[in-house]
Amino acid sequence: MKHLVLKSFIDKESGELHLPASLFISEDYTRVESLHELGFLLPNPNTETLKKPTQKKGSTRQKKVSDHDVGENTESTKNNK
């Protein structure tokens, strides 16, 4: 997607010089928003259609029944007798 350059900058990812009134091409929503917030770009009005990064959830795995130590339960039942 093409975005209008407002201030000249050197792209840190490609090393290219972008001059005012030229077009910056990117499909990276986060990158475009970052450059817009810094005042370098006027994003394309359709920027919202770009895929926004999804936040990764922590990989906390719930314990399965098979993960529990079965030996603990049998030990405690033996002690209770």
Image: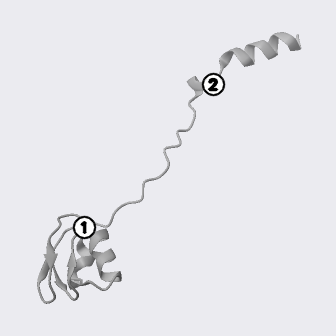
Query: Furthest-right residue in view?
Result: 81
Amino acid at the residue labelled 2: His
Horizontal side, residue 52 vs residue 20: left or right? right
Q: Is residue 31 visible?
A: yes
In the figure, 67 relative to 23: above or below? above
Horizontal side, residue 40 vs residue 60: left or right? left
Residue at position x 88%, y 14% from top?
80
Q: Residue 75 appears at what percent x and percent y?
A: 77, 13
Quadrant of the image occupied by residue 79: top right
| Along the line of sight, the residue nearer the viewer: 70 or 32 | 32
Horizontal side, residue 19 vs residue 53: left or right? left
Q: Residue 16 appears at what percent x and percent y?
A: 14, 71
Residue at position x 82%, y 10% from top?
78
Q: Could you classify mark 2 by the number of other residues whose Cα lies within 10 Å: few (under 14), some (14-19), or many (20 or more)? A: few
- Report how far apart the C-alphas of labels 2 and 1 lie in the structure: 50 Å
Residue at position x 33%, y 75% from top?
34
Q: Could you classify mark 1 by the number of other residues whose Cα lies within 10 Å: few (under 14), some (14-19), or many (20 or more)? A: few
Residue 63, numbered label: none
In the figure, 52 relative to 37: above or below? above
Residue 68, numbered label: 2
Q: Is residue 1 visible?
A: no
Residue at position x 32%, y 67% from top?
52
Disc 2, SS: loop
Quadrant of the image occupied by residue 11: bottom left
Quadrant of the image occupied by residue 31: bottom left
| Along the line of sight, the residue nearer the viewer: 46 or 7 | 7
Disc 1, SS: loop
Q: Residue 4 appears at what percent x and percent y?
A: 17, 85
Q: Nearer the viewer, mark 2 or mark 1?
A: 1
Amino acid at the residue labelled 1: Lys
Residue 12, numbered label: 1
